[in-house]
Structure formats: structure tokens, C-alpha cells
Amino acid sequence: MTQTEMLEFAKIAAKGAGAILMEHFGQISSYEHKSTPIDLLTIADTQSEAFILNAIKTTFPDHHIIAEESTIVENNSDYRWVIDPLDGTTNFVHNLPIFAVSIGLQYKGETIVGVVYNPAADKCFWAEKNGGAFLNGESIHNTSTNTLSNSLLVTGFPYTHDDRWSKGFDLFKTLYGKTQGVRRLGAAALDFCFVAMGRFEGFWEFGLQPWDVCAGALILEEAGGKVSDWDNSPMPFSGERVLATNGFIHEEMKDILENDLF
Ligand code: IPD
Ligand code: CA
Ligand code: CA
């Protein structure tokens, strides 16, 4: 299968999973807790993931898979799927329509396909390596705003409330004071896409996971933006620290974040 065909496969899988999420949206009456009391798991996460895994295992039985709610499917393959079946579970539980399915595909460790689908708004973002970034078929690009003082940023916070969490609020205050504002939307995959389509100039976060960042990072890079670690080295696959911008304010944000490599 060509890269473009694999992108088409990922879009169909994301839309199918999104339809499952919409069957449950507004109807969640119970959920489980994961790493902490505020880290939630719903039937929608589980069913969305089962649908995507089944599609991948049927079509690409030898591919490696990392998905948030399952154990790793270890295969000796150069292809690795990286999946968040529901990014923004807390929003989902509270009937906020800001959530997405995120599907990334890597070849030899490099992301070659990314799809992020926000089913409540029927917005499908996608990109393939060197092919540009799209929203529902229209090419998207980040802004060219080149100062932090004219920028609107977005960020997020981890479920674990430790020392890093409180340092994160210090950074929030610092960046709030240097920009037109900072938003916290609650779905990291969409945060990348909203920088890619020009709603925000930059996004930073720490303590994310591979499935939060894999697809969105490619979409932003293909839209013309820049993604890195806080010190400008390559973004770790782990999602441990992320700086994602329109490129023009990258240096200014890096200068602030690199002093806090927690
Ligand atoms: C979460 C969201 C949120 C981010 C959290 C993630 P989940 O993912 O992306 O924006 O701040 O760190 O864990 O749990 O809703 O898939
Ligand atoms: Ca997530
Ligand atoms: Ca999730």
C-alpha cells in the first residue's frame, strides 16, 4: 500500500471511531478512573480503540501498534501505529464537544501519516509527510505572527498533581503575561491542529504521551509550523515536553521554556 493509501485508511478508521464516539456523546453516565482520580476512562474510549485496532490488525496484521488503552502490539515491523481513541476524555464526559480521535503512522520512527478527527464538529485534519496539511480537504497553514506579544497560546496540564504541576502554573503565568492570552482546551491533538490552522500561534505542554502528539505534530509541521522539545532539540516520541508553534515565535518561546526543563 502506498503512503497516500495508508492515509486514506487512517481517515476512514478515524471517522469510523468518531462515529462510535458520537453514539455515546451526551450519554455518559458512568466511567472508570485510571492513573489518578481525575484520569477518566469511558466505554467510548474502549469501543473507539477496539474499532481502530480491529481495522489495523485486519488490514496490516504485521504492523506494530501503540494505543492508549491497550498493551502494545509488538510486531517486528518498520511500521508503527500510534493511537489515541479519544483525546479529551474529560471534555467528553462533561459534554464539551472538544475531543478527537488521533491516529499517527510511523515508518522507521518517522511519522509519515497523521489524522486527527473532531467528530462533534465533523472536522478532519490530516497530513502525510511532504504532502501538506488539510482540514476537510482544504489546505491549512499556521499564522505568520512573529511576536509573542501578538500571540494567543494554548497549553494543558497533566493528571498528576506533583511539583512539576505547580511549576507548570508558574510557566502559565509567565507566558500569560507576555501574550494576548493562553487557553486550555483539554485535547492535545486538537491543540496542535489549531496551531496548524492558525487559531493559535503556539502550544506547549509537558507530561504528554506518544498518542497525544504523534499525529498532531506531523499536521502542524506539514502546515508550515515547527515542533520541538522545550530546548529546540527534536520533540521526544514520548511526548514528555512539547513546543509547537507557527515557527515565527518558536525562538521566543524556547528562550522562556528552556530555563524550565522539568
Ligand atoms: C489528555 C488531553 C489533555 C492533556 C492531557 C492528556 P486524554 O488526553 O490531551 O489536553 O492536557 O495531558 O492526557 O486523557 O483526554 O486522552
Ligand atoms: Ca490524549
Ligand atoms: Ca485518550
Image (tube, helix red, strand yellow):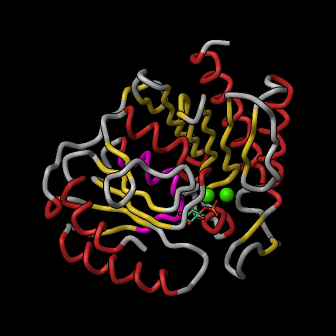
The quarter of the picture where the N terminus appears is top right
Residue 186 painted magenta: yes
The picture places residue 92, in percent across and down from the top left corner, at 65, 62
The picture places residue 201, in percent across and down from the top left corner, at 27, 53
Q: Assign ligand 3 to one image quadrant.
A: bottom right
Q: Is residue 163 left or right of residue 253?
A: right
The vertical placement of 222 against 153, above or below, is above
Majority secondary structure of magenta residues? helix
Residue 174 painted magenta: no
Q: Which residue is drawn at 81% across and 72% down?
A: 32
The vertical placement of 37 against 64, above or below, is below
Q: In this view, does 233 lie to the left or right of 58?
A: left
Which of 246/96 is in front? 246
The picture places residue 233, in percent across and down from the top left corner, at 36, 51
Which of 236/197 is in front? 236
The quarter of the picture where the C terminus appears is bottom left
**Looking at the rendering, which quadrant does residue 63 occupy?**
top right
**Looking at the rendering, which quadrant does residue 178 occupy?**
bottom left
Total marks placed: 0
Which of 35/15 is in front? 35
Q: Give the range drawn in magenta.
A: 184-195
Q: Which residue is drawn at 47% across and 64% down?
A: 185
Q: Residue at x 71, y 57 (%)?
A: 25
Q: Residue at x 39, y 25 (%)?
A: 132
The picture places residue 138, in percent across and down from the top left corner, at 40, 26
